[in-house]
Amino acid sequence: MNQTMAVFESIVIGKNSIPSLAITVFLMIAIPIAAFIFWRRKHRGQTNYSYLIAGAIGFVVSARVLELGVHYFCILSDNPVSRFITGNTLAFVLYGITMAGVFEECGRHIIMRHILKTNRTRENAVMYGIGHGGIEILVVILPSIISYLMIAVLFSTGDLEKALSTLKITEETASAALPAVWAAANFGYSSMAMNVIERLFALILHIELSVFVFYGVVNSKKAYLPLAIILHMLMDSFPALYQRGLVSLWSVELWVAGCVAAIGVFTLNLYRKSPSLH
């Protein structure tokens, strides 16, 4: 057994890992569902399911299909472009925040302008944001938390060989799998709180940017699309810096909270000026 494989023998699952992960899974499912139910019940006459569905599809197509396609060439493949981006912190950060801003906000704009031509209410703009941010939780964040929970349960049994076999961890894949196992082992209630707070902020931001882009579409204000892209990029700047180990996780949360609050003040004014059915 190589040195990396031997490390798995020393891993001890924290006593709070499994319950905190289980609660996190529940909350990740509950957050988008609760947001939808609350908004739909409050604005039944002004909202339509098509905006929720469009928001979900818009995120999947723009961020998980088109953007990932670009990432495959620029990040995942081995070529001069990918080597430059991954080897240069400034290039990596600028690339990451630009791609996220351009693909998600352009996708939001295209769908709202060219597909959702009816029922253009400010309440539906919020519904779109719930769909966009909600599906991100369900298809991007939730699977990783579930995988951590599965890892924690398997390693907590004390049968290392069975855990490694079930997870298909071999000597060749051990180095790549180790960070996920460590994350699962050390997941606790503080990690749960950070993940839940981060997702709440992200969902609120998607709602705000949906209202922002919606206002630009219904009022034919072209400047709102590039402004939305810039705001999205600014929001993602600290998370991108965190990926490179340049800032702490708490500074990321404070930055995101500040951005959400600042954008929210401006967006609330746009929401009040947007059309609604009474």
Image (cartoon, rainbow, N blue to C red):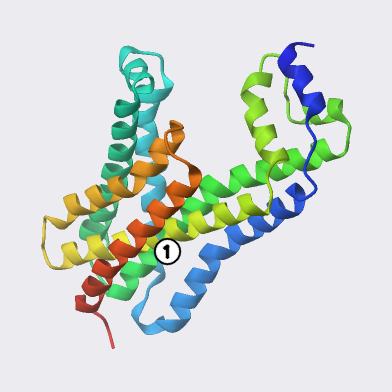
User: On the rendered structure, is 131 left or right of 189?
Assistant: left
- Where is residue 156 drawn, in percent x and y? 83, 40
Q: Is residue 80 above or below residue 265?
A: above
Residue 87 falls in image quadrant: top left
User: On the rendered structure, is 185 left or right of 216?
Assistant: right
Q: Which residue is labeled 1 in the image?
A: 130
User: On the rendered structure, is 213 left or right of 14?
Assistant: left
Q: Quadrant of the N terminus?
A: top right
Identify the residue shown where x is 71% and y is 17%. Answer: 4
Identify the residue shown where x is 43% and y is 56%. Answer: 202
Q: Is residue 55 above or below residue 171?
A: below
- Where is residue 264 drawn, in percent x and y? 31, 66
Identify the residue shown where x is 34% and y is 64%. Answer: 261
Identify the residue shown where x is 23% and y is 60%. Answer: 213
Q: Is residue 25 above or below residue 116?
A: above
Q: Quadrant of the C terminus?
A: bottom left
Circle 1 packing at 10 Å, graded few (<14), some (14-19), many (20+), is many
- Where is residue 103 drawn, in percent x and y? 29, 43
**Three-letter code for the amino acid on which mark 1 is drawn:** Ile
Q: How many numbered discs sit on the rendered protein? A: 1
